[in-house]
């Protein structure tokens, strides 16, 4: 069966006026870096990329070698393109300015180069998440303030899962689409024209070891799921937790589900990062017909105050997300 390549898909989006030729090129470059990251992930120990880099990132977390290598690959693939004004990465405290030697472009790129770091060394799916914003006009060196735009302003967002297959989900604001890496050809091909999350679900994903710290609405929701048929919900629920957001959200997109990393008594602001984790994922989930909230606010409406700020995340099948939101209002 013939599948459209990512480039062909994006060329159609250019013709339809959904993306500019420059945005098409930027997405292609990011995808190219992800192909390279995926190849390294597949090689594992043979490529000498497992283990610790021996350094800490801005969050005070130990960096894995693959975090650092993936970050560099994404920068190398995009900084000389003439498409970017600046970029932000989970691995760097400040916005990365495009070196003087390279031309500047209209976009701001944000990414988590390697999501699910705790799974790198144990051969469980990991991924890359990215988001594209427009750079406010007239800025030669975009500072933090240039990036602090709500998620609703994203022009494109995507994530790649390095699993048994290497997969990408992308949105440019006209639905969410799914690609699979054709390893022989070396590029992504369109394998899901319309990603659509079932509105109802009986599957939840949450790190239950945090239960003692949860806020009452989350506790109530999960208690009722666990009570199953005999409880308030009147049906049994199943649970999944990969501990790589990319893999958990991918499953949620495909067969429905609710993914939760809520804020709690320990992680008072939440655990996941707004700008390069929650926002791109929420954009994709909404474009697939789902919903994304921190419990009280639509994630895409949150006005960011910091590049690396954290946020509670509850996303997935619309009716379940609304169910939990209602408990937050009660
Ligand atoms: O980026 C953070 C992350 O690795 C996510 O991919 C994942 O959902 C979460 O952390 C896992 O957290 P925990 O280790 O608490 O299960």
Image (tube, helix red, strand yellow):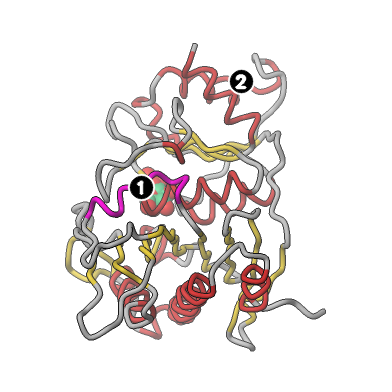
Q: CA distance from mark 1 to mark 2?
A: 41 Å
Left or right: 321, with 48 as reference point: right
Residue 134 is covered by the magenta coloring:
no
Residue depicted at x 27% and y 31% = 266
Q: Quadrant of residue 213?
A: top left
Query: Farthest right residue?
Result: 1
Q: Which residue is mark 1?
A: 149
Is residue 13 positioned above or below 223 on the image?
A: below
The chief SS type of the magenta part is helix
Is residue 53 positioned above or below 243 on the image?
A: below
Residue depicted at x 44% and y 37% = 301
Give x and y (percent) for residue 72. 30, 76
Label 1 residue SS: loop
Q: Label for residue 114?
A: none
Is 95 in front, or is 133?
133
Magenta residues? 144-153
Looking at the rendered structure, the number of numbered marks drawn on it comes to 2
Is 301 in front, or is 325?
301
Give x and y (percent) for residue 289. 66, 43
Give x and y (percent) for residue 214. 38, 25
Residue 145 is covered by the magenta coloring:
yes
Q: Which residue is mark 2?
A: 227
Is 144 in front, or is 66?
144
């Amino acid at each position: 069966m013939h599948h459209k390549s990512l480039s062909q898909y994006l060329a159609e989006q250019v013709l339809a006026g959904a993306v500019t030729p420059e945005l098409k090129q930027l997405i292609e470059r990011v995808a190219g870096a992800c192909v390279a990251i995926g190849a390294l992930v597949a090689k594992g120990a043979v490529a000498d990329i497992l283990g610790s880099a021996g350094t800490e990132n801005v969050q005070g977390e130990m960096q894995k070698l693959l975090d650092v290598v993936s970050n560099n690959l994404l920068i190398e693939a995009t900084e000389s393109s003439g498409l970017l004004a600046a970029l932000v990465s989970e691995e760097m405290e400040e916005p990365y300015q495009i070196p003087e030697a390279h031309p500047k472009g209209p976009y701001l790129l944000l990414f988590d180069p390697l999501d699910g770091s705790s799974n790198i060394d144990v051969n469980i799916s990991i991924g890359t998440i990215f988001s594209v914003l427009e750079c406010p006009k007239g800025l030669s060196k975009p500072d933090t303030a240039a990036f602090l735009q709500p998620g609703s302003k994203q022009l494109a967002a995507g994530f790649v899962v390095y699993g048994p297959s290497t997969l990408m989900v992308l949105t440019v604001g006209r639905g969410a689409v799914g690609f699979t890496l054709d390893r022989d050809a070396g590029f992504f091909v369109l394998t899901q024209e319309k990603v659509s999350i079932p509105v109802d679900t009986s599957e939840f994903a949450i790190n239950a070891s945090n239960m003692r710290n949860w806020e009452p609405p989350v506790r109530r929701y999960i208690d009722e799921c666990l009570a199953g048929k005999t409880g308030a919900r009147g049906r049994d629920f199943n649970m999944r937790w990969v501990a790589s957001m990319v893999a958990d959200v991918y499953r949620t997109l495909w067969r429905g589900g609710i993914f939760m990393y809520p804020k709690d008594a320990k992680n008072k602001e939440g655990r996941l990062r707004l700008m390069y984790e929650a926002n791109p994922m929420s954009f994709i989930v909404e474009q697939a017909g789902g919903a994304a909230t921190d419990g009280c606010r639509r994630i895409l409406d949150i006005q960011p105050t910091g590049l690396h700020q954290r946020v509670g995340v509850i996303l997935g099948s619309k009716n379940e997300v609304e169910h939990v939101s209602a408990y937050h209002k009660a």
